[in-house]
Image: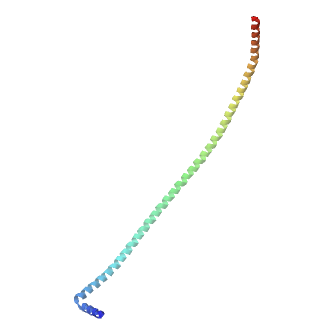
Amino acid sequence: MSSASFQKILNNLSKNKNVQSLLENFQTLSDEIKKREGELKGKFDKSKDEKIQQAWDKYQEIVKVLSASEEKLEKEVSSTIAKIKKSADSLEKNIQVAKKKAIIQKAKLEKALFKKTMTAKKGAAKTAKKTAAKRPAKTAKKVVRKATKKATRK
């Protein structure tokens, strides 16, 4: 029942000229919205594609810059490592030369010290012989003096 009355109301409304013009306006608006939607969708898709392409181009540009920077950095690191190795080799050679010189100098100093100690020992031995040779004479003189003093006192 309510559907029959509802149907009746719709028929009456659809016959009304104002309602018909309103429905026509809604239809034209709906068509226009669909048309605009298609245009906007196309623009958005086109704009989206352009933005994606711009982002991709920017990404490629950044990758190129990074690659160039990486290559430059690798070259600098390689050259620095080569310089360090060369410097290390040079230092190692200098250390070996200095070590040899130090060993030679040590040997010379040891020889000189050995000669000094030997001459000092020889000199000490000679002085000891000289003093030993002189002492008996001194002691003999003392003995003679004491004997003469005792003899003169008596």
- Which residue corresponds to the image point at 37% horizontal and 72% vertical from the top-left? 47
Q: Nearer the viewer, residue 21 or 78?
A: 21
Image vertical order of residue 133 relative to residue 63, above or below:
above
- Which residue corresponds to the image point at 43% horizontal and 65% vertical from the top-left? 58
**Residue that lies at the very extreme toward the front in this rendered image:** 154
- Residue 139 falls in image quadrant: top right
Q: Is residue 15 left or right of residue 90?
A: left
Q: Is residue 64 left or right of residue 24?
A: right
Image vertical order of residue 39 relative to residue 8, above or below:
above
Image vertical order of residue 15 relative to residue 120, above or below:
below
- Residue 30 falls in image quadrant: bottom left
Q: Nearer the viewer, residue 61 or 127?
A: 127
Q: Nearer the viewer, residue 92 or 115?
A: 115
Q: Indicate the quadrant containing the C terminus: top left, top right, bottom left or bottom right.
A: top right
Q: Is residue 6 left or right of residue 149?
A: left
| Residue 18 x, y percent position in the rendering | 22, 87
Q: Nearer the viewer, residue 43 or 12?
A: 12
| Residue 5 x, y percent position in the rendering | 27, 93
Q: How many marks?
A: 0
Q: Indicate the quadrant containing the N terminus: top left, top right, bottom left or bottom right.
A: bottom left
Image vertical order of residue 18 relative to residue 58, above or below:
below
| Residue 54 x, y percent position in the rendering | 41, 68
- Which residue corresponds to the image point at 29% horizontal and 82% vertical from the top-left? 29
Query: How is the protein colored in the picture?
Result: rainbow
- Which residue corresponds to the image point at 77% horizontal and 6% vertical from the top-left? 151
Q: Is residue 134 left or right of residue 89?
A: right
